[in-house]
Image: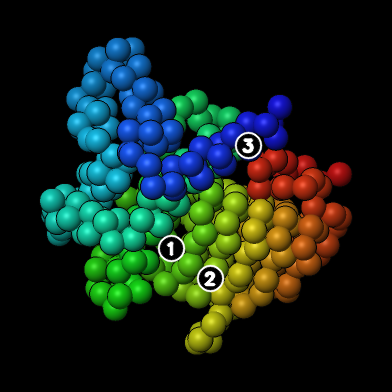
Amino acid sequence: MTAVRIKSAQQRAEQAEEPMTRTLDPIWSSLRVAAETLTRKEPALASLVHSVVLAHDRLEDALSFRLAQKLASAEISALALRDLAAEAILADQTIVRAARADISAVMDRDPACKTPLQPVLYFKGFQALQTHRIAHWFWNRGRLEIAFVLQMRMAEVFGVDIHPGARMGQGIMIDHATGVVIGETAIVEDDVSMLQGVTLGGTGKESGDRHPKIGRGVLIGANASILGNIRIGECSRVGAGSVVLHDVPPCKTVAGVPAKIVGDGGCEHPSRAMDHLIS
């Protein structure tokens, strides 16, 4: 049953990438239905839901509005932030394509998520990840100060600190998210799940390529630290509270301080199964 649901969510994200009319975007359509249902159920939230979702025709516009709304401060206005987000999203459709895949990932993997509206409205792991995608776009174009402002506000608002230089795939879930730190040269490939307190960091003051590379389908438990320019092989698991200092082969489970291999990956797709038990 789970595998069928995962497959259908991936298909929804892939379908949304196709150059069809936006009214046929399945992620956006389901999000609007959830928004309309919520306004009827909780009239007190109608203004919020209308401003974030129902006032817009596309996920692109709703996303730029919501991020600007959350990140605005006395130092940078919501209008300026919305213009920046819209500039990046308009120029690079992979940003919103990844957002669709991230919504599907949260829906599939987080039992607390009941509708596709919830990540957009409430989930700071999703919101922080979309903020990073925009910051990364500016970083790659040499507009470093804009990227750093977005990183700063992300950390202040969401408690998540992802360097603008880090490279993040799509279909990623950062569950709970508080205290997640990801360094400048880190790479997180597609279909990864991680929980709160995860650190993808360096081991000291070294420069250059100094942060971890996380393979596709990896599951990283809460408060795990993965340090240095090492690779976690695809479809592996990192146990909660572990400190990983060396490469991990694909499809293995590591745990402990320092982490050691304690078994196989546990299943074909650890990041989707979200099974943290070590048998």
Q: Residue at x 20, y 31 (%)?
A: 55
Q: Which residue is the site of mark 1?
A: 162
Crowd tier of the residue under label 3, counting other residues whose Cα lies within 10 Å: few below 14, some 14–19, many 20 or above? some
Q: Mark 2–mark 3 contact, CB under 8 Å?
A: no
Where does the image place residue 261, in percent across and percent down from the top left?
Answer: 83, 62
User: Do the CB atoms of the residues marked 1 and 2 lie less than 8 Å apart?
Assistant: no
Image quadrant where one finds the C terminus:
top right
**Distance between the alpha carbons at the discs numbered 1 and 2:** 9 Å
- Farthest residue to the top: give it: 41
Indicate the quadrant containing the N terminus: top left, top right, bottom left or bottom right: top right
Tell me the kind of residue under disc 1.
Ile
Identify the secondary structure beneath mark 1: strand
The answer, for residue 2, to whether it is visible in the render is yes
- Residue 210 pos. (x, y %): 56, 80
Q: Position of residue 249 (x, y in %)?
A: 78, 67
Secondary element type, mark 2:
loop
**Crowd tier of the residue under label 2, counting other residues whose Cα lies within 10 Å: few below 14, some 14–19, many 20 or above:** many
The residues tagged by marks 1 and 3 sit, at their Cα atoms, a distance apart of 27 Å
In the rendered image, the vertical position of residue 97 relative to residue 275, given as above or below: below
Precedes in sequence: disc 2 or disc 3: 3
Residue position marked by numbered label 3 in the rendering? 6
Q: Nearer the viewer, residue 140 or 256?
A: 140
Specify the quadrant of the image occupied by residue 255. bottom right
| Residue type beneath disc 2 | Ala
Residue drawn at x 35%, y 74% is 140
Q: Nearer the viewer, residue 141 or 174?
A: 141
Left or right position of 171 against 215: left
N-terminal-most mark, 1 or 2? 1
Q: Which mark is residue 186?
A: 2
Under mark 3, the amino acid is Ile
Which SS class for mark 3?
A: helix
- From the viewer's perspective, is 122 left or right of 72? right
